[in-house]
Structure formats: structure tokens, C-alpha cells
Image (cartoon, helix red, strand yellow):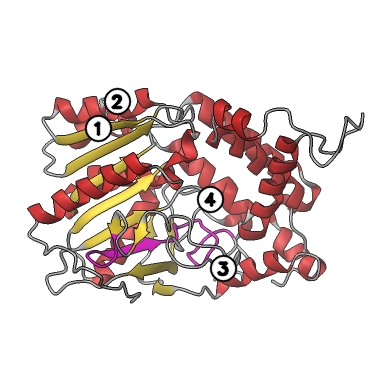
Amino acid sequence: MSVQHDKERFPKTQQRIAQALQPESKCFQFGADAPLELDGGGVLAPLTIAYQTYGELNAERSNAVLVCHALTGDQHAANVHPVTGKPGWWSTMVGPGKPVDTTRYFVLCANIVGGCMGSTGPGSLDPATGRPYGLDFPVITIGDMVRAQVRLLDHLGIDKLLAVIGGSMGGMQVLELAAKYGERVFAAVAIATSARHSSQNIAFHEVGRQAVMADPKWCGGRYLEEGVIPRKGLAVARMAAHITYLSDAALQDKFGRQLQDREGLTFGFDADFQVESYLRYQGYGFVDRFDANSYLYITRAMDYFDLHADYGGVLANAFNGTTTRYCVVSFTSDWLYPTRESRQIVQALNAVAADVSFVEIESDKGHDAFLLEEPEFFATVSGFLNAAAERRGLAPAAPNSESKTV
């Protein structure tokens, strides 16, 4: 499975492929005798879930917080990433004294099924053939991802979460878990998300998938066996998607029409503008840490997500009888998952008299605001989780205590 041709040229890509097979995180494997039933009608077995934990689980097992990652995230939410060497994708949110305080909570983050950092996905070896699954991997859904995480909770002996929290696709998992397994969720924080993917978002994802599949090195999904990587196609997909994570104001303020290391236009197709250079950097940097087939499968899962349809076309039916406490958060400049979609979730929860708080954060940072420094957002999450913890009888965090990874 070694990518012979690209190994010397792209060592970080090779390192990521190694992480898919032998991740630097905890793993649990469900054997062939315990297959994961999939919404598409098939099963997946054996199944490996790679995960990270932060903080300590209390004796009552009542302080567990599940963090659900977004499309391009993974289990490394608050530790140094083993491939990039950079801080975890939510190190601003998770850690000692932070809103998801690891001196008080036991925080769990799992790589989703279909991912590429150790959980079973299209880059994993198919036990039937000994080769990478490629496109033989079954199409998965948000529901399948959540079902696998529930099995991990069972393995860890966590009957009920203090909270589940996530943004974007992570927010979809939050809604799915709270709707289907409400008895196991005391509080839920859904951030910058939607109860179903819009036509526009499906369209953006299709552009990305077609970019990947148009790369000759995609090889019909068998690129790992061929020793190549569809770098150009995946980079273009990431570039297009990254634009949707930002706002017009953020791009204009950061780049405007400034030129990239030159005095004037070159009258060619190099990156004349800083914004062009930035997108290329984002695109090709992404290829080092992500798998092209995983990108296809995960974006398809997001497109299929539709809680309305799952409950007879009435979103409120998803939350009938819920006892979970909800916090829904949106950002004013997020045009990927605009505030109106968060309001639809809130209205559905209000229709069944659920306990729900809603906050729209003023920000010019676009969809990615939930990953960045936003004091009002941090205060909202911290306050909501503290109230949930007090309601459940958790002791306050000890002052000046240090978090431990378990």
C-alpha cells in the first residue's frame, strides 16, 4: 500500500497514509461478529474507531463531553497533530480553563467512519481482498457515523453524555445523536449547522467531487494501489470549498486586490494576487493531511443528511418528547449555513417545548468563525456547559489544576 512514486516527493502524504493504518491515538476494533449496520443497507465489519480523550472520567461517568468534528477534521481536536505538527483543530475551545474545560470534563473526539486518520474508511484494507477499499467502501451517512460513536460510548461505559458539541458537519452529528439517542444526551450544542443540506451546498460538494475524479491520478479510486495521489484534483476541491468557509468581508479585509510578491501584473496565469496564492497554499496543504476518497464519501454523507425527511418531512417530530437541553449557535457572516437554517432548528425545538437557547454571534469571519477566536462564542459555550454541569451536579473545576490526557 506504500505510495512508492510519491513517497519521496510528498513525505507528509505518506505519513498521513501511515496514520490511517497505525494511528497515533487510541483505537478500538469491533470484530466481524459485531458488524455496523449501515443506512444504505449494507454492513461494515470489522470496524476500527480511532479516538482521543482529554481530561478524566469521573467515578459517576457523568462528565463526558463528545466533540464531533467537521468534514476536514479528525480526532486530534486539542493535541498536536501527528502529520502537520500544528495544534489541534479546536485547541481554542478544548483544554484547561477553556470553554470545554478538560479540568472538569472528560472530552472524547473520534475520527468518523469514512475518515482517514485511523477509523475505518476507503483507505483502510478490505479484509475480503487485502487491498484498500477504494470505491468498494460502502456509502455512509451521518447516521452511520453517529451509530459508530454510540458503540464507542458503549465500549467506554458511558451511558449518558453530559454534552455533545460540534460545528458544521459536527453539528449535524449533534442533531442526529440528540434526535435518535436523546436519552443518552443531557445537553447538545449545535454550531453553524443545518438539519439538512441545501441545494447550494450539494452543488458545491459536487464541484469538489468532480474535481477529484477528473484528476488522472485518481485512477477510478485505486490511486493507493497505483502509488500515486490525485493531488491536483483534491487541492482544487479544497480551494473551492475553502472560499465557502470565509466571508466576502474577511477576504476583502485580508487580501483586497493586493499582489503577491510583485510590483505589477505578469499578464500570465501565475498567482498574481495574494488571494490566489493563499488558496493554492490551502489546497495543497490540505492534500498532505487528507484522503481524496474520504473527501468523496464524507461530502456525500453530508449531502444525504436530512432530518426533516427522516421524520415525515416535519423537523419538530425529530425532537418529540426530548429532555435534552439545546444550545444553537450561528454567525452573522456565515453564508454556508446561514442563520435562517439555525432558526429552523430552534423553531422545531420550540414546537415541542424543548429547552433551547439560541445565539447569533456578530462576526465577519464567515463559517470558519467557530474555529477561530470569538470571545462571545467562547462565553456562550462556556456558560451553557457550566449551567448543564451544575444542573447535573458536577463539582466546579479545581482552580489552577492541569488537564491530563487519558
- Quote the CA–CA distance across marks 2 and 4: 25 Å
Closer to the camera: disc 3 or disc 4? Answer: 4
Q: In the picture provided, is 193 more to the left or to the right than 23?
A: left
Compared to residue 340, the image places residue 107 above or below, namely: below
Residue 343: mark in rendering: 2
Residue placed most toward the observer, 386 or 118: 386
Residue 327 x %, y %: 24, 39
- Quote the CA–CA distance across marks 3 and 1: 38 Å
Q: In the picture provided, is 22 more to the left or to the right than 143?
A: right
Q: What stretch is highlighted in magenta?
A: 101-122
- Quote the CA–CA distance across marks 3 and 4: 14 Å
Disc with the residue nearer the chain's start (2 vs 1): 2
Q: Is mark 2 on a helix, strand or loop?
A: helix
Residue 20: mark in rendering: 3
Disc with the residue nearer the chain's start (4 vs 1): 4
Q: Name the residue under label 4.
A: 72
Compared to residue 227, the image places residue 166 above or below, namely: above
Residue 231 x %, y %: 74, 52
Disc with the residue nearer the chain's start (3 vs 4): 3
Q: Quadrant of the N terminus?
A: bottom right
Residue placed most toward the observer, 249 or 295: 249
Residue placed most toward the observer, 286 or 371: 371
- Quote the CA–CA distance across marks 4 and 1: 26 Å
